[in-house]
Image: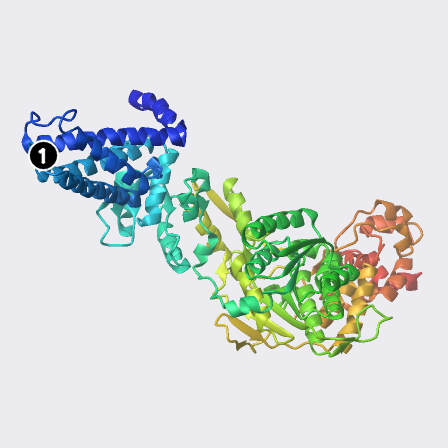
Amino acid sequence: MKSPHKESSQPIRQRLLDLSHAQKRLIQVGVDLLLVWLALWLAFYIRLEDMTPIEPLGDHAWLFTAAPAVALPIFVRLGMYRAVMRYLGNEALLSIARAVTLSALLLALVILLHGKTSPPIPRSVIFNYWGLSLLSIGGLRIAMRQYFTGDWFNLRELSFRRPENGPPRVAIYGAGSAGNQLAHALLMGHALRPVAFIDDDAHLAGRTIAGLPVYAPDRLERMLGETGATEIVLAIPSASRSRRRRILEMLQAHPLPVRSMPSIAKLACGRLTVNDLQEVDIADLLGRDALPLRPELQERCIRGQVVMVTGAGGSIGAELCRQILANGPATLILFEHSEYNLYSIHGELERRIHREAPGLRLVPVLGSVRHGSRLLDTLRHWRVDTLYHAAAYKHVPLVEVNIGEGVLNNTFGTLRAAQAAIRAGVRSFVLISTDKAVRPTNVMGGSKRLAEMVLQAFSGEREVELFDEPGLSPQPNRTRFTMVRFGNVLGSSGSVIPLFREQIRNGGPITVTHPEITRYFMTIPEAAQLVIQAGAMGEGGDVFVLDMGEPVKILDLAEKMVRLSGLSLRTKTSPDGDIEIRFVGLRPGEKLYEELLIGDGATPTSHSRIMRAHEEHLPWRELKPRLEALAGALEADDFPRIRELLQRTVSGYRPSREILGRPLQEHPASCQPVPPGCTWWFHRMPGRTAKTPDGACPAVMAAASRPGLDKTLPRITDEATWRRLDLPCPRSADRSFLLAETLARQAETDPAATNILTGKERQNR
């Protein structure tokens, strides 16, 4: 329950805060004038213990006029009236001390120059005046600061019980300048109440800072009991990630939400609210410090040059654009197929250019990397020097059910971009690749590895006979191709971290595919820095990988996120916990662990965190026919053929057992001939998942092939057999495997299916 005093003081405080700056300054000057007179009068009284010989309106009027005439201009000159009262800090208090001291010295000089007075003015009056002025002027400002922050002299209500109501009580980890600023900002906001500091400095433990007790980290239990803190806010912006990780691991033992303070710049502006406090950066849980910057590498392919980024609106592409902008390009071209993403990143960079680099040209281009002519026109028109190719489909489950689009965008989009770069004379081409390209088990990884192989093949050719350009003579190749491979990116679209946060907000459960699944992680800025620095190191055909440290167990990451949200895990031993972790099984194409290297032939580079991989690839004369065959299979929606070509071309590609991708529409004109008696099935049969022939018996393989299908279909002559065996109509190539495996499954219990599969039915007839 709020006290009447607090309720009555609130309108007065608000009215004072609502005054204009000029009105506030006028009030301060008037109050200081009265305080100077009062300090001078008390200085005489303390010295003489009798005011009879002092005549402020008579013989000593000159002194009572000189005191404010000397003091107030000095106060103005030293900025005492520029400080915001409720944000008064140590520097402002030092300014007050300097101003009062200087005014006292000048007043002493005025008295000395005035000559002897009757009665004489004792010299100790000046010392008394200085001390009283300092106490009254400085003390009043400190008192008003406490009043405006709502913590009147930082006094606490005397009570044997801690009040249950009121704002949430928070402990601030870090008693330095950032922690002090945060404490004052929270006091001003009234939404959170700081009750204690926690600090690693043993010399601060047990002391009081800004009215708050300081506790050592090993006294957290005691702090919680004495202060009733229900949340911890980190105020250590200068701490390394490794130190923050150690702190977070220590805090996990206590069921408290942990948040982090915003930037010091925002605090200094006085705009901090509770909503500005951020969730803990997941990068802090990893504890890996950022990549060491090499300015010469950052600028080599950027400064003063024309740079283009494909996929500029994506997570990696947008961060690349931000860091490219910081390295002084002449022109930055944003190439993006999503209108909204392009609008967002273009608006953000335009505002930044207006502040930081008014002369830089920023060009937004809507287009797809699958349109080679659009790419070529853009590269030629702007005479691009460096191209960062970030456009790709990267979500494994989505690409797995959209095989054709994934290969077209990831492989053939890279091929079109590389060929356009060769024809336009681009000097440097950098591909953003993935650790999923190493021994891939999914189409996303296989298509990205094939994209790497295209660039590796181009790097070995001085003249390139372009793909799907029969009218062109071989093109001279002056482009340096580089590939940069890294693991999962924290916070990117589709990543696991935003999913876990949303599931925690919704009360769970958190879905994890497997208890042993691990992944490499890095932050988006780290990934962009790696791309830029490694791209500058490339000599042609290089595959660079980052030393990403140890892989992270996804289950451990989920558990830490739950605990740092102040919640508990619901398990068999703790059925009353808040959040359950549910294992849902590996998705199609998903691996338990990822790798960064296909072989063991990685060599160090001049950069301590970047390695160069040496991996086998096909020369262009061998790769080109396979790409042509792959393009034909894509055109025909022949998914088994697409898979077969990927397996033949990409080393170590081991796909999942199911082919999930299929055309969105299947028209009668493109279907296999429907046998007599089952035309009805053609119209009723819904889209079904086709099975891969991996591990199938030879009879299934033979029946599923195109010649085998032509032999198998005529064997199924009556509608009743189709109904009884629940057979799909093979309307396109991918259905042939489904038909063959359905027959094989039914053959285990139904002789009719065996006869159809082996051809014995015709022999019997």
Residue in the picture at 82% in, 57% down = 753
Residue 588 in view (yes/no): no
Quadrant in which the N terminus is drawn: top left
Comparing 739 with 350, the one in front is 350
Give the left or right position of residue 173, taking residue 634 as reference: left
Q: Where residue 274 sits in the image (x, y, percent)?
A: 43, 38
Q: Where residue 6 sits in the image (x, y, percent)?
A: 31, 24
Image quadrant where residue 696 sits: bottom right
What scheme was used to colour the molecule? Answer: rainbow
Give the left or right position of residue 178, taking residue 453 as reference: left
Residue 460 in view (yes/no): yes
* Type of amino acid under label 1: Thr
Quadrant in which the C terminus is drawn: bottom right
Give the left or right position of residue 564, taking residue 74 as reference: right
The residue where tag 1 is placed is 117
Comparing 520 with 683, the one in front is 520
Residue in the picture at 46% in, 62% down = 290
Q: Secondary structure at mark 1?
A: loop
Comparing 351 with 152, the one in front is 351
Up-down relation of residue 367 to residue 604 (above or below): above
Image quadrant where residue 54 sits: top left
Q: Where residue 615 sits in the image (x, y, percent)?
A: 62, 76
Mark 1 packing: few (<14 Cα in 10 Å), some, or many (20+)? Answer: few
Q: Where residue 693 sits in the image (x, y, percent)?
A: 75, 64
Residue in the picture at 39% in, 27% down = 19
Q: How many numbered circles are shown?
A: 1
Give the left or right position of residue 120, taking residue 207 as reference: left
Up-down relation of residue 263 to residue 484 (above or below): above
